[in-house]
Image (cartoon, grey):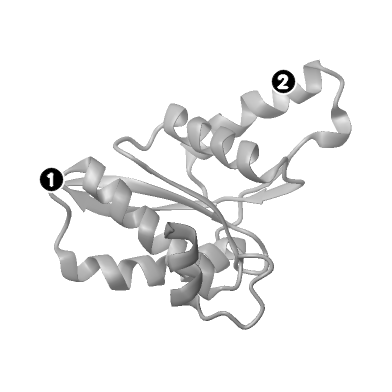
Amino acid sequence: MDETYIKVSGKWCYLYRAVDKEGKTIDFMLSKLRDRLAALKFFNKSIASSGMPYKINIDKSGSNTAALEPINMLLFLYGLWHLLIEVRRVKYLNNMVEQDHRGIKNITKYMLGFKSFEAAEATIAGIELHRMLKKGQMENVGEMPAWQQFYEIAA
C-alpha cells in the first residue's frame, strides 16, 4: 500500500493505491488529505472489497500506521488474534506498488492536473480499470482483448 500525488485544482491530492505481491491492483482511492482518517477510510474500503490481508507493506508514513492500529486493536478485542494484520514498515518492500504508480503518472502528467475533484476521481477510476484489464484481472474472458473487456463492462 502506498500513496502518490495528483494535482487537482492547483492543489496536491493523494491517490492511495494497494497492489498484491503479483502486481495486481487491489484497490485505490483519491483523497484531499493525507491523514489517519483518509488512510483508515482507504483500508476499510480495500478490506471490504478484497478481504482481510495477512500482511501489509507500507512506507514509514505515520498516518498509515496510525490507521492500521485501530483495525488490529478491534481484531484483538474481539479475540480474532489469528486475523491480526502484520504491518511491515520497510520502504524497499514497497517497490511493487511504487513501480505500479508509473502507469498512472505517465498518463496523468500530460494533463497538468484536473479541474475538479470529481473529474479526477472519474478519470482515475477509468485509468485504473483499464490497467486492471491489461493486467488480466477480469475473470472468464478467455482471449478477449482489453478494449473489448472494457466495452463489455461499460455496456
x and y percentages locating residue 50 in the rendered image: 66, 46
Q: Identify which residue is drawn at 56% across, 68% down.
A: 96
Q: Secondary structure at mark 1?
A: loop
Q: Which residue is nearer to you in this view: 128 or 91?
A: 128
Mark 1 crowdedness (10 Å alpha carbons): few <14, some 14-19, many ≥20: some
Q: Which residue is nearer to you in this view: 52 or 84?
A: 52
x and y percentages locating residue 54 in the rendered image: 77, 46
Report the amino acid beneath label 1: Ser
Q: Is residue 77 above or below residue 122?
A: above
* Marker count (numbered): 2
Q: Identify which residue is drawn at 29% across, 56% down.
A: 123
User: Separation of disc 2 and disc 1 at Cα?
Assistant: 38 Å
**Direction from residue 42 to residue 5 in the image, left or right:** left
Quarter-of-image position of residue 65:
top right
Q: Are marks 2 and 1 in contact (CB under 8 Å)?
A: no
Residue bearing the label numbered 2: 74
Q: Secondary structure at mark 2?
A: helix
